[in-house]
Image (cartoon, rainbow, N blue to C red):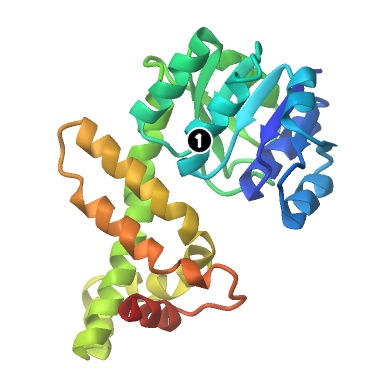
Amino acid sequence: MTKVLILHPGAMGSSLGLNLNINDHETYWVSENRSTATAKRANDQGINEVSNLRQALDIAEVVISICPPSAAFDVAVSVAKHEFNGIYCDANAVAPDTSLRIAEIFNDSYVDGAVVGPPSHSPGTTRLYLAGVNAHVIAKLFAGSHLGCCIMPKGVVSASALKMCYAAYTKGTAALILALRAKAEHYGISDALQQEWEQSIPGLWERSERMSQGVSRKAWRFAPEMREIARSFEMASLPNGFHKAAAEIYERMTSLRDVSEVSTAAIVKQLLKS
């Protein structure tokens, strides 16, 4: 049994807690300055509440950071300030050089992680990629649970590199498709575009209709993730403008975060209004 602190149990983080609990580990979260929604998610998955970070780090042997990409470095610094001596796994969608900055804080105690897939509530849907000398320690925690773990063969930040490549396509193309829908609406040719897509790219229009609800809820997280992806392109000496634009597309959608039912038409209207 290992004592694991999850910072912070959103939809994905709470599912990691569920999988750790399946394996009879003890999981914890910090309630200070967190929302009632976070509390409900954590409690629903049997994650133990601790009032502040100092107390939680006194208990934990492992920390898994799963937070918005823009907060990943600051979360790591806050943990390091308390002189945490266990293993620190950053499982956020960050550029390899951001992950490397965090690795420099924790040295060999650092594990670079990246989640691909939805919150892991059933087997075969979600994988946690891991890199670093202690990657096997994190993989062992989840062995036999719903979450699959893949240890990258080389490179201390190779898990983050893989995430940046994967999300550059999945979330990047989603932003592109929604931008195309907005541009077509601006020029008054939406019906014509739909007819052409149905002939030449079957399923694309339907995809643009299906993605609206999920994307609108997560756009506030996707925008900083697109900037991390843009940075990863820049560090590879590749053009990064596309994903900077994708970040702006998602930023224009953030006001729809708490709207219960969002259509693609509503997203198009919001994109054109901004």
- Residue 2: in sight, yes or no? no
Q: Which residue is mark 1?
A: 72
> In this image, 185 relative to 24: left or right?
left
Quadrant position of residue 196: bottom left
Q: Which one is in front, 196 or 39?
A: 39
Q: Is residue 169 visible?
A: yes
Q: Nearer the viewer, residue 51 or 221?
A: 51
In this rendering, position of residue 255 left or right of residue 97: right
**Which residue does the image show at 39% across and 62% down from the upper left?**
250
Q: Secondary structure at mark 1?
A: helix
**Residue in the image at 48% along x and 80% along y:** 263
State the quadrant of the C terminus. bottom left
Q: Residue furthest front?
A: 81
Q: Is residue 195 above or below residue 3?
A: below
Q: Nearer the viewer, residue 78 or 250?
A: 78
Percent x, y of residue 76: 55, 27
Query: Where in the figure is residue 216, as x and y percent of width and height?
Result: 49, 67
Residue type at mark 1?
Ala
